[in-house]
Amino acid sequence: MSIIRNISVEPTMFLYMFAFMITSVVEQNFFLQKACRVNNKLSDDICTNIHKKENEDYKNQVLDTTASFHQWENISAHVFPIILALFLGSFSDRRGRKLPLLMGLVGKFIYSTMIVVNAKMSTWPVEYIIYTATLPSAITGADVAIFASCFAYISDITTLQQRTIRVTILDAVYLTAMPTGVALGSYLFYNAFNESYADMFAVNASLLLLAIIYTLFALKWQTTPNQRSLRELGCCGFWCDYFDRQHIKDSITVLTKPRRGHRRIFLYILLISMALYTFQRDEGNYFYMYTFGKFNWQVSSYSTFKTFKSAAFVIAMLLGVPLMNKFLGWRDTTIIFIGTWAHAIARLFYYFAPGPTLLYVGAVVCSLGPIVGPMIRSMASKIVPQSERGKVFALLSVCDNAVPFISGVCYTQIYRATLQSSHGDGIFLLTLATQLLVFLLVLCIHLVLGGNSLAVPEVAENENGLISNENKQAQQGNNAQQETH
């Protein structure tokens, strides 16, 4: 019963990720088919058999068009969330995590619904997806709002000792949706929906609707005593409160205020590390095109590989992190070292793969890679007091979502530059380099910390997020105790 009582945002995250994964591979193929039939005006026969050797030139032409689309779609998807995130953190610290989470889920629901419309409109080119689905979704905060709100919610309701394992469990929950979602998506696409993209995204939208309903009725509006009710704002007051310039000042203050024990520098390093770590996220769009071009993989083949890869992720997250964190007592920095090297070494397997076998070997090696994200978030939450966690998670989301302005362009240009010569395998070298940079940055924190604790002492705070007068002596005592260790 205690386990059930502790359930909070996990079902929301599962439904959100399950919806995404059901259509993840199908979506990539949908973009290719749109680019083939509408943008390049190729016949149905050529587009249906685009993977055959006699259509090699057409295939490269379509892949180049799709790569260009991904570049602009990535940028469009992240312009508004970056701006919103500057206000999101401070607003959610003051008003709760639930409303921003609901806004993000509604945005993803809009995206899926509009993809259904695009699938029905056979004459709309692939770039119409940006105007009708990506931008309307981005205005709500979408993925930024969902991830920042979920992880901040978990941080609010857990103690310092529980936080690493609970953040990891949340990651494991949404990772669990990956293999099941991809496998079910492939089955539905071929066996239930007769390769209908519209039907697939209708299922996606339905799952997101369930996530919205659960979040609306099951989660709390406020999760800390400092958070105040939205009712006092009214309809008109909400917008003024959300876009209050003070929120930006508060977020900037989190970055600039002095912190004991080099923690301000550590915060900068963690933000940069998150940006570099999430660089590899944009590799996924081109990974499918890489296998499509080099091995002639279709939706079924890539779905099988992605199911295997994500299942390995889940096993590593469920078994690896508790083993390293709880039983072996390894520090967050040590676990990050393992994750970054797993990502880097896996890319060597992908780069040199003469056939599909080495891709599967790389997937096994890469299974420990996703532990980096939750470890960075966990470390960031430990170096700031409770009143600043929402701002920090929002700043992490800004770094996360600002990356596509650079990574999307980099991956697109490298893929297009190496498409003719080596099927775009240069993308893996870029990922390898960024992961090694994360390793070096976190190594700096590890060496400076030595045997000291990263966490700040938990101190009672007033509603403005400031340490109350009656607790100042306790804080000074804790600080003095830290200096002696």
Image (cartoon, grey):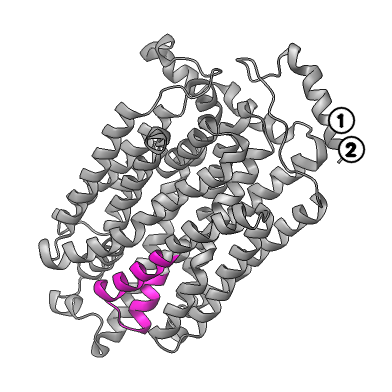
Is 171 displayed left or right of 477 in the figure? left
Kindly indicate the quadrant of the structure image that contains residue 188.
bottom left
Residue 366 image point, x, y percent: 51, 69
Kindly report the distance in space between the C-alpha atoms of the residues bearing marks 1 and 2: 7 Å
Residue 484 marker: 2
Residue 404 image point, x, y percent: 50, 55
Residue 122 image point, x, y percent: 14, 59
Is residue 406 visible in the rendered image? The answer is: no
The residue type indicated by label 2 comes to Thr
Q: Residue furthest right?
A: 484
Name the secondary structure under disc 1. Answer: helix
User: Is 426 in front, or is 214?
Assistant: 214
Q: Residue furthest front?
A: 1
- Asked if residue 295 lies in the magenta stretch, the reply is yes
Residue stretch in magenta: 287-312
Residue 450 image point, x, y percent: 82, 52
Q: Residue at x 53, y 65 (%)?
A: 368
The residue type indicated by label 1 comes to Ala
The reply to whether discs 1 and 2 touch (Cβ–Cβ < 8 Å) is yes
Local packing at callout 1 (Cα closer than 10 Å; few below 14, some 14-19, many 20+) is few
Q: Residue at x 55, y 79 (%)?
A: 348
Query: From the image, which quarter does the N terminus lie in?
Result: top left
Residue 480 marker: 1
Name the secondary structure under disc 2. Answer: loop
Task: Identify whether 102 is placed above or below 82.
Answer: above
Task: Identify whether 289 is placed above or below 393.
Answer: below
Kindly indicate the quadrant of the structure image that contains residue 406.
bottom right
- Asked if residue 250 lies in the magenta stretch, the reply is no
